[in-house]
Amino acid sequence: MKLWFWICCFLIFKSMRTEERNFRLFIDQVNITHVDPEVYESFDCKVFQFNNRSYLDSSHTFKYTVTNLKVHAVLDFWKLKSRQKMTLFDVQLDACYLLDNASKNKLFNIYIKNLRKHANTKFKCPFQANISYEVQNMTMNEQDFPSFVPLGKFRSVIEYIIDQKLAARVIASGKIVSHPPDP
């Protein structure tokens, strides 16, 4: 009897994990502002759409070795047909710690996993001078998210703080739309 219980549990959890998602996450635009020319040699980002998906390419090069990097991250969400903003998180984190250790926040884990998958080099502290840290064709896989995610719009603001000074701000906006599962 116990064996049947565990087999049933396995099948239920497996089907929950592999259930096709009925939504797509699209990034409409990414803007980089407040880039400190004393810190960055370059900082670029572009988003493009291909095969009904959003992809992101970015690169940044530091002028000097960066050992102390903090990130202030905010994620705001508006449900479909609602004007009320929900702030899903507003946190300040040690980016070096976040890159080296698993986070308890599932959204950060999804982001770090995709960052590592699409990066040209390992993102870790200290960040070296004159090395181009690049991410190419990064996309968010809906299978990484829970099976139900509400439809709506989002805005993400990420501020990079180096030596207690704002070094750059990245603002991304997009939407979560209904989409039939892939065949």
Image: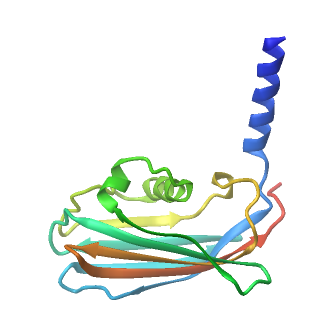
**Quarter occupied by the C terminus:** bottom right
Q: Tally the numbered discs.
A: 0
Q: Is residue 173 above or below residue 58?
A: below
> Residue 61: percent from the left, percent from the top?
26, 73
Tell me: 117 left or right of 85. left
Tell me: 65 left or right of 81. left
> Residue 177: percent from the left, percent from the top?
76, 73
Q: Which residue is the extreme one toward the left? A: 64
> Residue 91: percent from the left, percent from the top?
44, 68
Which residue shows up at 36% across the image and 54% down it? 99
> Residue 145: percent from the left, percent from the top?
66, 55
Which residue shows up at 44% across the image and 71% down it? 73
Name the colour scheme: rainbow
Q: Is residue 171 above or below residue 90?
A: below
| Foreground of the two, 181 or 84 | 84
Which residue shows up at 68% across the image and 58% down it? 142
Which residue shows up at 16% across the image and 66% down it? 65
Q: Is residue 104 above or below residue 61?
A: above
Res 28 quadrant in image: bottom right
| Foreground of the two, 110 or 105 | 105
| Foreground of the two, 92 or 102 | 92
Tell me: 35 left or right of 173. left
**Quarter occupied by the N terminus:** top right
Res 162 quadrant in image: bottom left
